[in-house]
Structures are given as structure tokens and as C-alpha cells.
Amino acid sequence: MSRRVVITGTGPISACGLGIEPLWEALLEGESQIRPIATFDASGFTSNAGAAIKSEDFNVRDVVPKTYRKALKVMCRDVELAIGAAAAAVSHADMTTKAVNADTTPSIEPTRLGCHIGAGLIAADLDELTAALSTSRNSDGQFDLSVWGQPGMGNLTPLWLLKYLPNMLACHVTIVHDCRGPSNTITCCEASGLLSIGESMRVIERNSAEACLTGGVESKLNPMALLRQHFAKRVAPTPEGEDPASCLRPFDPMANGTIIGEGGALIVVEALDSALARQATVRAEISGFAATQSHADERIGLGTNPSHQEVSDAMSAALTAANVSPDEIDAVFPLGSSIPGVDEAEATAIETVFGERTKSLPVVPLTTITGNCGAGHSALVVAVATQALESQQLPARINTTNSATLDANVNPACECELKHVLVTTCSQGGQNAAVVLSRPEMN
């Protein structure tokens, strides 16, 4: 495993828009995209805010090839976001694929182009379900599972299931961009994107591919997904009259839950020799990756081993793999969910790994700007950390004012010498992942 793996393109999609430019601008300005939910009536929820992508900022028809537009009818929101993120990543990497120009030789031979995408538990469209459920009544007019199991399900739209399988994200992206190399889907909540990037790294290291489209996306901005987060006690209340953006406070004693967003990122990760051969811009190097699993006695993922050792183990193992000491890390980009138990796990792990440096080491969460993008969030963070390394800047930090142990409090964007940064996440299911990104050195 001697091949060096680098990032040549990032394709974030978030409430800030499509691509790195609008996202980076919002992060530098500290402009939160969290607003009251307008895509459905969320007034009955205690948490009724989110970070939604505006319709004027993204339309999947603008990025999907004309020859593939018939497939739009079997694309759910998550698939559409993946298609958009893939298009942005390929463009940013200055790559040619079948989607860019079907008549030109692709930058990467298709059998050597892989695809690994993290996905969430996709919620079905309520209107589609309701149309079928309404026909599943017995003679008394009550809903009847036996009727649902026979004629009721038959009233779902044709190919209904193909819209909502988690692997449909990678399915459509691989068809559109003709990725015939190793492909997989990872569904591990917030860790999904980072775990997918780690898998792509391993695939390239063992020479099973030259490059991969990798990362994750998810949208929880629908009634069923929000209801799940409500029952899991993960979302912050958004009292009437209060700015909902201020309700998300990572690592703050006042933190009492997360706020959902939609989006994520796909990243072009590539063997260094491949990137140099096609004269691509090398934006960052993936120096080390590691993953662990935490045990939680309860089922909803709010509590873990009190020592949070598994979370710190992932960070330490990534540093070891990168041959980088804790003193060489210049910033940490965490999940920063604002869920107290999850924040505690991350904060304790950071203290364990970095010791006395903890209070002076910049910790930069993105959730206050983009919301918690679920399976796509850690990939979104990788895109931002890559841009930070390229520009030698750190984004603004907002909302948190009383973090006693971490350097995570309110701070404007600033120039900063960055050589190595740590991206880390834990997840609702207990999966933890960490990756070290480094400024590329060609020697």
C-alpha cells in the first residue's frame, strides 16, 4: 500500500448552494443557512427549522445529461443531491467523464474509476405513500394491513422502490459518469461520508482503481426523517420568536440538540501518480485514515462508553497512519452536532489526544452554518477542510460562547498556517472515523 492518495476535486452541495465557492463564502462570513422549514408544514414539531437548499440554487435537470433525464422520475431527493455533488466534483477536478463529453476520451479509464457513497435511511415521499395507503381500508373504513399487503401496495407508483434504496445514489452516479471500478454504499449515519472516503483510499492504495468519486449526501428535510430524529431526542427545540440559527451551539453548555440540514459532498480522490500524469491540481493529500466502533447500552446513540476511548482511538490511529504527531495538527474539523452526549464524546476524545494543546487548537464545526447533513456531513467537512488547506484560512465560528475546554467559541474567519488538519466524526450508530489531510508535497 505505497500509493499516495490525494484530493483533486470537491463537490459540496449544501444550503449555501452547489460547489465550493458559495459554501466557502458563507463560512468565511459566518452566515448561517438555518431557517424555518418551508418545504412542508413542520409547525407540529418542537424543532421546525433546517438548512434547506433553495430551489433557485439547485435543479438536478441542470446537471444531469439530457440522455439520462428519463431517469429523473425514479430519483428521490437524495439521489438528485448526489448527481449534483458528482457533477461539481468532476468539474472541480477538471476531469472528463461520459457525463461531461461522451465523445471524448475520459480522463480516467472507466474500469479504473470507482465510486463509494455514504447514504442515509431514505424516507419515502408521503404523498406517494398516502395515495396507496388510502386504498388499504377494510369494510369499516379502517386501515387494514392485510388489504395493504394485497391491493394497497399495488397502487404505489411503478418502480417506487427503486427511488428509495440507499444504493441508488451510487447506482445513478456510476451510470452517469461511467464508473465501472469498485463501488459500494455505506449507511452509518454521520460517519457514512468519511467511511466512504476511507474505503476509496484503500481501493486506490491497493491499485484497484486510479480514482474514485466518493463521499456522501443525505436530506432529512421531510416529515418522516424529522420525526425519527425527534423520537431519537437528537433535535434542538426552536421556540417561536427565537432565531432558529442560534439554537445550534456545538460544544456549548447551552447546547440541547442538533438541527437538520441537507446535502453533503462528493470528492474526487485519486492516486498521486494519476493526478500528476493528467496535470491535475492536487488540493490535499489524504495522509491517514482510521475507524472504530463505540458501544452504547441504549439504542438511540446518545450515550457511549463514558471514557469515549473508541472516539479518541479513531483520531489517534489516523494520526499514526499519517505518521503525524498530535503537535503537528493545526486544526480539528469535528462533527460538532450540538447534541450534548455526542459533543461530550468528541470533546473528551480531543482532550485525550491533544492534551495541553486542546485549549489553543482551533476546533471548527460547520453545523452552525449548514445544519447537520447526516450521512453527507463528514464528506462536506472534508471538502471544507481541503479548501482551508488550499487557502490557508479557517472559517468563522458562530453561536458557541462558553466552551470551557475547546477552542470552539465565536471567532471570525482568519488566515492560519495549515499543514495538517484532522477531520473527525462520530455517529448515531456508534461508528467513528477520522482522516488526516495534509498540504501536498510533491517530493
Image (cartoon, helix red, strand yellow):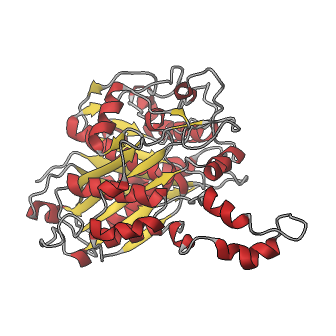
Q: Residue at x 60, y 56 (%)?
A: 429
The C terminus: image quadrant? bottom left
Q: Which residue is drawn at 58% across and 70% down?
A: 157
> At which x and y percent is residue 117?
41, 63
Task: Name the image quarter holding residue 124.
Answer: bottom right
Q: Which sits in the foreground, 2 or 130?
A: 130
Task: Name the image quarter holding residue 106.
Answer: bottom left
Q: Is residue 60 above or below residue 142?
A: above
> At which x and y percent is residue 258?
58, 38
Q: In this view, does 94 lie above or below 173?
A: above
Q: Residue at x 45, y 25 (%)?
A: 398
In the picture provided, is 309 more to the left or to the right than 179?
Answer: right
The N terminus: image quadrant? bottom left
Residue 148 visible:
yes
Q: Residue furthest right?
A: 140
For the image, the number of numbered tags is 0
Q: Is residue 110 above or below residue 382?
A: below
Q: Residue at x 45, y 41 (%)?
A: 334
In the picture provided, is 401 more to the left or to the right than 225?
Answer: left
Q: Which sits in the foreground, 374 or 65?
A: 65
Q: Which sits in the foreground, 398 or 271?
A: 398
Q: Which sits in the foreground, 347 or 221?
A: 221
> At which x and y percent is residue 280?
13, 56
> At which x and y percent is residue 363?
42, 33
